[in-house]
Amino acid sequence: MRLPQSLWWSSLDEPVVPRPSLQRHLDVDVAIVGGGFTGLWTARELKRRDPSLRIAVLEKSVCGFGASGRNGGWASALYPLSDDTVVKRYGVEAFNAQRHVLYDAVANLGACAKEDGIDARFTQGGTLTFARSEVQSARLRASIESSRECGVGPEDLDWLEGESLTAHGHLDGALGAKFSPHCGRIDPSRLVRGLSDAVERLGVEVYEETAVTRIVPGRCGRQPEVVTIGASVHADFVVRATEAFTTTLPGERRTVAPIYSLMVATEPLSSSFWDEVGFAKCQTFADNRHLIIYGQRTHDDRIAFGGRGSPYHFGSTVEERFDANPKVFAMLEATLHELFPNLNGVITHRWGGPIAMPRDGSPSVLVDYDSGLASAGGYTGDGVVLSHVAATAMADLLTQPDEETEFTRLPFVHHRNRHWEFEPFRWLGINVGLGLGTWADRVEERRGVESRAGHLLDRLLN
């Protein structure tokens, strides 16, 4: 078995030894397909509500193999859709209820990890989205003003410049930055591997190297069934928590689009470098270009830095060879030196993997009480905290089906996503979107004006 090649996996205290695979038939209350954040948080929250529940987690590789163990390490209150879009779809009241849940969930995630004895290297220093041109500055200021109209105050989102900005951090050419305190830095592999141990201590059965080939809905009084290569599981409920790997299951090819996000990491950097650029509280950072980038200062003073740009692969194909793209790695390294001209450290790690993007951009939490099938996911890269929130909603739906809670009222709960278009339209649309983002950034950098391609991209995404 090949483990992910990343900074996070290489820095675990002990080698990862796969747990035994499932070799016999199981009868449980809840079967969870997928051993990432969503599946493990769901198991944890279910056990906290009802310790008597029989729960099994089935993971094709090892827990955290997917995006949960390879991501940028942002434990943020970010949501895949813009504030304006959420308000237009669901209303101001629902928007404000959701954002406060997400704000609280950032600190709660750190507290839950600590409670479970997991050293996830969580530090809540906030996040900075820098403006490195007048175009980016105008766009960020407009987004803050729009959020103000929805009720977001300066304590939750503010514009920083001058000394108030440099007190947090500095990127070359920065004119200002949008700052939110609602983000923490984590080591994702430590968190997800620690969670897998924590749920086992609660009595959850965790099976690794157990590939699920089919999920069969319950019907006519029969329970739903999970079929694996060597065995099967019957349960009252089956929760699919497979994110980008959902497309590998029968009938799910158009449920989400697997979008590849790649990362690099430097060697540990000198104290003089960090004295110059800041980020003393481990604030995460990005800028306002269209083709997303994201970075953090790690526990051992590296920069872990990632971004989009890898193409979507025809037919929603997910393969290990797509985890690496020399052209994108080179672009990330060049961008890192553009942001930090004084960076002298070498790149020591390069890695990547797929994230799940729904057609309408919204995550979802669904339970069909008739068939016994449930699902959660579709975070488009913002899943570290969202997965915990989604899992909490899922646990409420399964254990308190007749009661409405703060989490089950969230607008993405009970939301059913559209399917993606058939090929080749899916391949054309997504890759055209990537091309528009690249072109828009190039035009804005060279001409200093907002690109029409950026407007086209916004229309495509929304």
Image: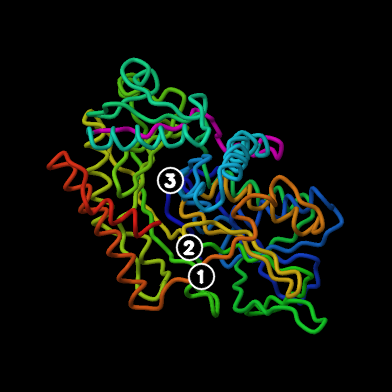
Residues at circles 3 and 2 in contact by the CB criterion of under 8 Å: no
Label drawn at residue 7: 3
Drawn side of residue 190 relative to residue 257, left or right = right
Camera-side residue of 196 and 165 = 165
Q: Is residue 313 above or below residue 44?
A: below
Q: In the image, is residue 129 part of the stretch drawn in magenta?
A: yes
Label drawn at residue 358: 2
Q: Residue at x 84, y 53 (%)?
A: 50
Tag 3, which secondary structure? helix
Q: x, y (%) of residue 310?
A: 31, 59
Q: x, y (%) of residue 129?
A: 37, 34
How far apart are the alpha carbons under marks 3 and 2? 28 Å
How far apart are the alpha carbons under marks 1 and 2? 7 Å
Tag 2, which secondary structure? loop
Q: x, y (%) of residue 460?
A: 34, 60
Q: Is residue 297 above or below residue 231?
A: above
Label drawn at residue 255: 1
Scheme of colours in the image: rainbow
Q: Is residue 431 above or below residue 133?
A: below
Decide: few, some or many residues near mark 2? Use Cα within 10 Å; few <14, some 14-19, many ≥20. many
Q: Residue at x 61, y 37 (%)?
A: 100
Residues at circles 1 and 2 in contact by the CB criterion of under 8 Å: yes
Residue stretch in magenta: 114-132
Amino acid carrying label 1: it is Thr
Q: x, y (%) of residue 457?
A: 30, 56
